[in-house]
Amino acid sequence: MTAPPRLAGGHWPVAVVGGGQAGLSASHHLTRRGIGHVVVEAHRVGHEWRARRWDSFCLVTPNWQCRLPGFPYRGGGPDGFMVRDEIVRYLEDYAASFQPPLVEDTTVTALRRLPGGAFELGTSRGTFTADQVIVATGPYHTPKVPRLAERLPADLVQLHSSQYRNPGALPPGAVLVVGSGQSGAQIAEDLHLAGRRVHLAVGGAPRVARFYRGRDCVAWLDEMGHYDRPVDEFDDAEAVRVRVNHYVTGRDGGRDIDLRAFARDGMRLYGHLTGAEGGRLEFAADLAANLDRADAVAESIKDAIDQHIAARGLAAPDEARYVPVWRPGPGHPRTLDLAAEGVAAVVWATGFRRDHTWIGVPVFDGRGYPMHWRGATSCPGLYFLGLPWQHTWGSGRFEAVGRDAEFLADHIDANRRLADVCGTLTGAPTSLAPALPAG
Ligand SMILES: Cc1cc2nc3c(=O)[nH]c(=O)nc-3n(C[C@H](O)[C@H](O)[C@H](O)COP(=O)(O)OP(=O)(O)OC[C@H]3O[C@@H](n4cnc5c(N)ncnc54)[C@H](O)[C@@H]3O)c2cc1C
């Protein structure tokens, strides 16, 4: 490894903030274009996967979708699902493959635009400047836990899904998992398989079958062009961006997550968590509807696959459709007495908030979401990379972050060439640069 660049007082054509898969992909494309840059990472490459995933974690997307630029998955199981430590190694090997100019253990704490258009980045190791900046700090910053958690009994162990490691790390007893997105459904399964009594508050997340008619549904959807569809083709693009992911798992070679089957086998399911009073929790009457809706989504995906097969006359084995194996009865419980049921821990699988408060450049909308087109903002030279649905489904995933990185690298290259001709990134003559508005 080459020695990391010294940041304080330095200037770079491009600063990349974040050394995850997005930041590394950006660095790869900048390197290929010979554009000077530095990648600043708060921890170490692969931090999110190493530090914030549970022990049995594995990808939900098949390995063949791991197509980081210049470094597609080359292991022996393209249709399999890398486990946590393999994902970390994949990222470490990626970095080793092209030696990005990486500064680790350094947090960018402030970003502001200077008069004239360059950027100043304050970090835990001093301040430096850059002509252009790519923010690749990931989409999942601050664990989101509802304030209702403050009203639960003090002796109950509470943790966010990003802190959950394994069933043995929780105190003996039953566990309540709140949330049934990808994390909640998989953590509930992890605990259930370990023989724990699990209570699961089921939300509105959709589900998808793992396999259908002889192939992984992801392979069908890929062939159908689903993953190439740009977000601006959707009428409800903003809603698409914040949609909860479908639950399914890659565990043990991949399978469905069928919450009804878990309930049949002893897991206790409830609807949305709505209240807490003296160790007694209340849930909405939406469990049946939530399960039905999740199944309906899974079946609609199968409908689309059927149509695709029929339209192209493809040979694919027939497959019977899903039949629900359990339904909540009319008197299904909507309360949970934590002490009576021996609940010792709560896992909040309730998502994350973005934190871009360190960015002092006015490019955010009313919800704090960066306004951008394919990652380019209205502030010349400031970009985002790795946002969910930044451009397509795979933007916030291994599948297409490389395509977005390439797009931005081209944009940055064009800006750089423009600046060479015009003097500044904004295209204004250099003599006027100090008069341009900052921020
Ligand atoms: C539970 C879960 C399961 C997932 N499963 C899949 C899956 O199966 N397949 C798939 O393709 N994707 C999956 N994803 C989505 C996605 O691949 C990950 O979120 C991925 O980590 C995003 O990569 P990134 O580089 O954009 O961000 P991150 O991996 O979050 O990396 C951002 C980096 O920036 C650093 N950083 C943050 N702030 C600063 C700062 N101010 N200064 C310096 N550095 C900073 C962080 O330390 C981090 O290393 C999953 C996500 C989650 C949460």
Image (cartoon, rainbow, N blue to C red):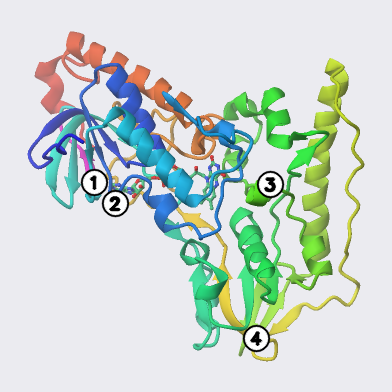
Q: Residues within 10 Å of mark 1 (few under 14, many from 20)?
A: some
Q: Secondary structure at mark 2?
A: loop
From this view, report whether residue 142 is shown above or below residue 117. below
CA gap, disc 1 and disc 2: 6 Å
The residue stretch that appears in magenta: 109-115
Q: Name the amino acid, label 4.
A: Leu
- Lower position in the chain sequence, tag 2 or tag 4: 2
Main secondary-structure element of the magenta-colored stretch: strand
Q: Which residue is mark 4?
A: 338
- Lower position in the chain sequence, tag 4 or tag 1: 1
Residue 209 location, quadrant: top right
Q: Residues within 10 Å of mark 3 (few under 14, many from 20)?
A: many
Residue 303 location, quadrant: top right
Q: Is mark 4 within 8 Å of ligand 1?
A: no
Disc 2 vs disc 3: which is toward the camera? 3
Q: Which residue is mark 2?
A: 43
Residue at the farthest left position: 9
- Contact, CB < 8 Å: mark 1 with mark 3? no
Q: Residues within 10 Å of mark 2 (few under 14, many from 20)?
A: some
CA gap, disc 4 and disc 1: 43 Å
- Contact, CB < 8 Å: mark 1 with mark 2? yes
Q: Name the mark on residue 104.
A: 1
Q: Name the amino acid, label 3.
A: Gly
Q: Secondary structure at mark 4?
A: loop
Q: Is mark 2 within 8 Å of ligand 1?
A: yes
